[in-house]
Amino acid sequence: MESEIRVEPIPAFDDNYIWLLTHGDRPHCAVVDPGDDEPVREALATRGLRLEAILVTHKHGDHVAGIDGLKADWPEAVVYGPAHEPIRGVEQRLGTGDVVQLDGLDLALDVLDVPGHTEGHIAYSAPGLLFCGDTLFACGCGRVFSGTFEQLSESLRALAELPVDTRVYCAHEYTLDNIGFAKWVEPDNPDLRVREERVRALREAGRPSVPSSLGEELLSNPFMRTDQPAVVAAASRWAGRELASPVEVFTALRTWKDKEYD
């Protein structure tokens, strides 16, 4: 059952997280977005785990470069990924409505199309869990590369419909930096101040700031708050005009961050 699933981060590169999924004492496991095979190999060897599945959210190298190495060691592992992106090694191509059944983990993951960061980005969800790659970050979102602003705005609005207690497993440790921009947008948001204190304490202790919860994102992530008056006002001031829709607000926020903060 999903409640027995354990999710742990495997750090990679400077700020990536590869997510390791296990179930109790079972030997089976799955990984999400393995940009590097070596830290995964070390983690599995230490634990005596057998790789059942490789889950990929999108095509960028820091999410897929470890596929070949892992398949060489665990040829029986099935590689799942987006149907609409050119990723070498993907064996099961997926989109909204598909379900990934991981029998060794007793886990079923629903697939969601969440394009915008890239043209075919997908996410995997189960009750209480969301693996969202670079679509939704803790207190932020991905840049728009091969997708569109409209797509990413709609993808975030779709994710906002998930239960508020959903744990959000994004793929990067960007939270403090994202909070910095969020404070530009909503300097008087009390939930944002509380979040910053908590995240700073975690990072000073050498602990990851993720997962977050969807409820926390709805309270403090400006990209998830594009219908809130304070966010609309801040984006409109930056754009120099009144913005009429959440998509316009999102586009202004993302462009503002790209040009003046990042």
Image (cartoon, rainbow, N blue to C red):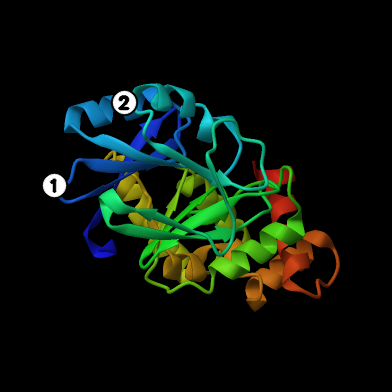
The residue identified by callout 2 is 41
Quadrant of res 204: top left
Q: Is residue 216 left or right of residue 122?
A: left
Q: Residue furthest right?
A: 241
The residue identified by callout 1 is 25
> Helix, strand, or loop for circle 1?
loop
Q: Label 2 sits on what residue type? A: Arg
Q: Residue furthest left?
A: 25
**Which quadrant holds the N terminus?**
bottom left
Quadrant of res 125: bottom left
Measured as percent of width and height from the top left, residue 119 is found at: 71, 48
Measured as percent of width and height from the top left, residue 37 is found at: 40, 25
Measured as percent of width and height from the top left, residue 41 is found at: 31, 25
Residue drawn at x 27%, y 49% is: 104
Is residue 23 or residue 160 the one in the foreground?
23
Q: Label 1 sits on what residue type? A: Asp
**Which quadrant holds the C terminus?**
top right
Is residue 98 or residue 33 the one in the foreground?
98
| Residue 104 drawn above or below residue 48 | below
